Image: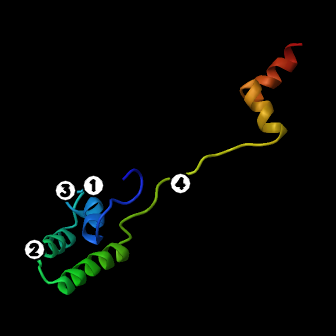
Amino acid sequence: MGLGAPAGNAATRIEAYVSKNGIYSSGVVPEIEDLFQRQARELDRKKREALLHQIQAIMHERVMHVPIYELAFLWGSGRASRRRASTGSRGSRIRRRTRI
């Protein structure tokens, strides 16, 4: 699982983010919760798919998920980054020069 979406079908992927029992949800939209409960009880595959599409449309219209971080590592290269790594910061290097 990790940082990606939960394994499974569309319902299990949506549940983690919008259901009241979802591990990543913080608050509930009653309209979505109702649709989610209805699709969980629905036996007809096409009707269930239509309910999940409604949930996704509501999520899209309301822009319910906004990424707040970018999973990336910052890497420095070149002379300046090696100098900062060895001295701590640019300011500490300047202070050392003025003491001499």
Considering only order in the chain, which callout, 2 or 1, is on the residue closer to the N terminus? 1
Q: Nearer the viewer, mark 2 or mark 3?
A: 2
Q: Marks 1 and 3, Cα distance to the nearest angstrom? A: 10 Å
**Residue plotted at (33% across, 59% down):** 6
Depicted 100 relative to depicted 6: above or below: above
Tell me where residue 14 appears, x and y as whole percent: 29, 66
The residue beneath circle 1 is 26
Secondary structure of the residue carrying tag 1 is loop
Considering only order in the chain, which callout, 4 or 3, is on the residue closer to the N terminus? 3
> Which amino acid is tagged 1?
Ser
> Which amino acid is tagged 4?
Glu
Q: Which mark is residue 21?
A: 3
Q: Marks 3 and 4, Cα distance to the nearest angstrom? A: 26 Å
Tell me where residue 3 appears, x and y as whole percent: 42, 52
Q: Marks 4 and 2, Cα distance to the nearest angstrom? A: 37 Å
Q: Nearer the viewer, mark 4 or mark 2?
A: 2
The residue beneath circle 4 is 70
Secondary structure of the residue carrying tag 2 is helix
Colour scheme employed for the rendering of this structure: rainbow
Q: Is residue 95 left or right of residue 64?
A: right
Between 1 and 67, which is closer to the camera in this rendering? 1
User: Callout 2 environment at 10 Å: few (<14), some (14 to 19), or many (20+)?
Assistant: few
Q: Nearer the viewer, mark 1 or mark 4?
A: 4
Q: Which mark is residue 41?
A: 2
Secondary structure of the residue carrying tag 3 is loop
Q: Marks 2 and 3, Cα distance to the nearest angstrom? A: 16 Å
Considering only order in the chain, which callout, 3 or 2, is on the residue closer to the N terminus? 3
Depicted 32 relative to depicted 86: above or below: below
Q: Which mark is residue 90?
A: none
Q: Is residue 60 left or right of residue 11?
A: right
